[in-house]
Each structure stands twice: as C-alpha cells, then as structure tokens.
Amino acid sequence: MFFMLNWQSSVKLRLSSIWEVLPAGVFKINTDAALNFRNNISGIGVAIRDCNGHVMASLCQHIGTAYQPQIAETLAILRCLKLAVETGLVPAVVESDALSVVNAITSKMVPNTEVGMVIHDILCILRNSNFISVKLLPRLANKVSHSLARLALGYVGEFV
C-alpha cells in the first residue's frame, strides 16, 4: 500500500511539472507520428484536452506509407489542426516534439520541399482559424499522442 501511494505521488508530481495550465475555454492539442520502415507504414496520434486536462477528442490514423520523420510529423500537425476545426475544439495551443517542424511553422519559413507544401497548408489553417500557438513539447511529455501513433501502426484506417 505504501509503495502504491508513493508511486502515485511521484507520478502526480511528474505530470504536474509537465502540464501547463491554460485559460478556461482553451484546448491543448498534442500530436505525434510513428514510423515502421520494415512494413512501410506510418501512424499519427492526436490528443485534444480541455484546460483541466480532460481528453475531449483523440485520433489514431494509419498511413500506408512510411514517410520520412519530418514529413510524418508535419502531416500529424496538419491532421490535428483539421480535427480541432472539425470538432470545434478551438481556440487551441498545438504541441509537438518535432523540433525542426515546430521551428519551420513558427518562423513561417516555407521550404521548397514536400514538407514545405504541408507547412504552407498548416500556415493557412493557422491564419484562418482560432489557434493560439504551435509549441515544442519535450518528448517525455508527449507520451499519449506517441502511444496513439504507435497504436495506429497496427490498424488500418482512422479512429476518432
């Protein structure tokens, strides 16, 4: 019993140090991608939480191609934006652990590459919708969306 209480306390401490409280009515969206090059597949995971941390929507989407990591992460951000708009879960802060993608989006620099085409679409959605920011999230704090992305590798289709 003591061990369980201790474990729960330490988990709560770690989670509270990761969770950033948002104003009422603002949603937090975490997104990630997973890749399996051997089977040539990718997966996208999205978790949308309210300002209290309650999950309002989640998504796992199987993609029948193993994209390069930067492309997969960019597609994951694009899909999370579309999901938030489709479900009306905005205004929102988007978080991803993909440093190069977050930097490209926040700098509004659109490279002349495949990733650039997706970033252009992301910037259009951000400009025309009620999104507050796109931020870098430590990988350790992105476990839910990472787990959803890995789960998507084992299923065909999209589950919301």
Image (cartoon, rainbow, N blue to C red):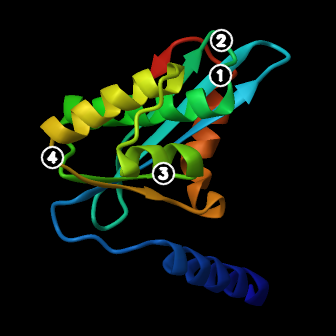
Q: Which residue is mark 3?
A: 103
Measure the alpha-carbon separation of dots 1 and 2.
6 Å
Quick one: label 1 or label 2, which is nearer the N terminus?
A: 1
Callout 4 secondary element:
loop
Measure the alpha-carbon separation of dots 4 and 2.
31 Å
In the image, residue 65 sits, relative to residue 151, either above or below, namely above
Q: Residues within 10 Å of mark 3 (few under 14, many from 20)?
A: some
Asked whether the beta carbons under mark 1 and mark 2 sit within 8 Å of each other, the answer is yes
Asked whether the beta carbons under mark 4 and mark 3 sit within 8 Å of each other, the answer is no
Amino acid carrying label 4: it is Asn
The label on residue 42 is: 1
Nearest to the observer: residue 94 or residue 62: 94
Amino acid carrying label 3: it is Asn
Residue 99: % across, % down: 57, 52
- Residue at the image point whose x is 27% and y is 65% from the top: 51
Callout 3 secondary element:
helix
Residue 126: % across, % down: 24, 40
Measure the alpha-carbon separation of dots 4 and 3.
20 Å
The label on residue 95 is: none
Q: Quadrant of the C terminus?
A: top left
Measure the alpha-carbon separation of dots 4 and 1.
28 Å
Nearest to the observer: residue 127 or residue 72: 127
Is residue 83 visible from the viewing direction of this image?
no
Amino acid carrying label 1: it is Ser
Q: Residues within 10 Å of mark 4 (few under 14, many from 20)?
A: some
Q: Which residue is mark 2?
A: 65
Asked whether the beta carbons under mark 2 and mark 3 sit within 8 Å of each other, the answer is no
The label on residue 130 is: 4
Quick one: label 2 or label 3, which is nearer the N terminus?
A: 2
Amino acid carrying label 2: it is Thr
Q: Quadrant of the N terminus?
A: bottom right
Left or right of 45? Residue 130 is left
